[in-house]
Amino acid sequence: MKIAVIGGTGRAGSRIVDELLRRGHDVSVIVRHPEKVAARPGLSAVEADVLDVDGLARRLAGHDAVVSAVRFIDSDPAKLIAAVRQAKVARYLVVGGAGSLEVAPGVALSSTPAFPAAYKAEADKGGVFLDLLRRETDLDWTFLSPSALFTEGRRTGSFRLGTDQLLVGSDGKSWISFEDYAVAMADEIERPAHSRRRFTVGY
């Protein structure tokens, strides 16, 4: 497949790019500074501004799927959605956040007292993004939320999938590595199972 990754040089985005290349896909990394992206077989670096709907749409046109891996507070979800729709890309997948996952019926993780204040703005904007996607009637979207702790680790290929509830292990820990998150994202691209839905991944 031909897949565009917006923000493909970030911590999550770069692992998704690695996983897609590993599987033999052609990947376009959409970045502000393509000259900083090292050349690799199957990879092309394309310059675009995520706030420029028309310009971004032109770069995304012709791809089979688009993955958005930019931070919510550094982008405008309405503009990203508009660009993907304008580009007429078949599938749109978003690297989501854990803040909007439920820890109890109707209670989002980001609303709990222990949620770090430093991540509140990002989490709240992620929730707005998800709400916008849920109102879409034409776009085939998927929003993949990580577990509470999203960090560097190993690619094990062993994890659990969930829906709107935070996944917590038997040890009381809620986490997923960037590497295994990328596996779950690539699996969803290749074998769609959560069309127009949010799902989550964790150990």
Image: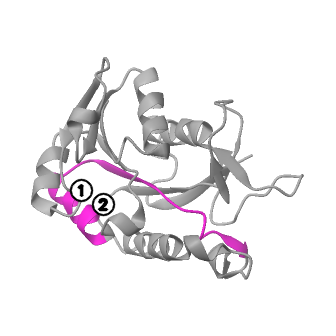
Q: In the rendered structure, does residue 161 fall within the stretch colored magenta?
A: no
Residues 179 and 63: in front is: 179
Image position of 171 (left or right of 183): right
As drawn, the label of residue 139 is 2
Residue 37, percent from left and from top: 29, 32
Residue 201, percent from left and from top: 64, 50
Residue projecting furthest to the top: 41
Residue drawn at x 44%, y 34% as measured from the top left: 190
Residue drawn at x 65%, y 73% as measured from the top left: 116
Mark 2 or mark 1, earlier in chain: 1
As drawn, the label of residue 122 is none
Question: Which residue is disc 1 drawn over?
Answer: 84
Total numbered badges shown on the rendered structure: 2
Image vertical order of residue 49 relative to residue 16, above or below: below
Q: Which range of residues does the magenta coloring cover? A: 78-103
Do the residues bearing badges 2 and 1 touch, measured as CB atoms within 8 Å?
yes
Q: Report which quarter residue 158 is drawn in.
A: top right
Dot 2 surroundings within 10 Å: few (below 14), some, or many (20 or more)?
Answer: many
- What amino acid does circle 2 point to? Leu
Dot 2 falls on a residue whose secondary structure is: loop
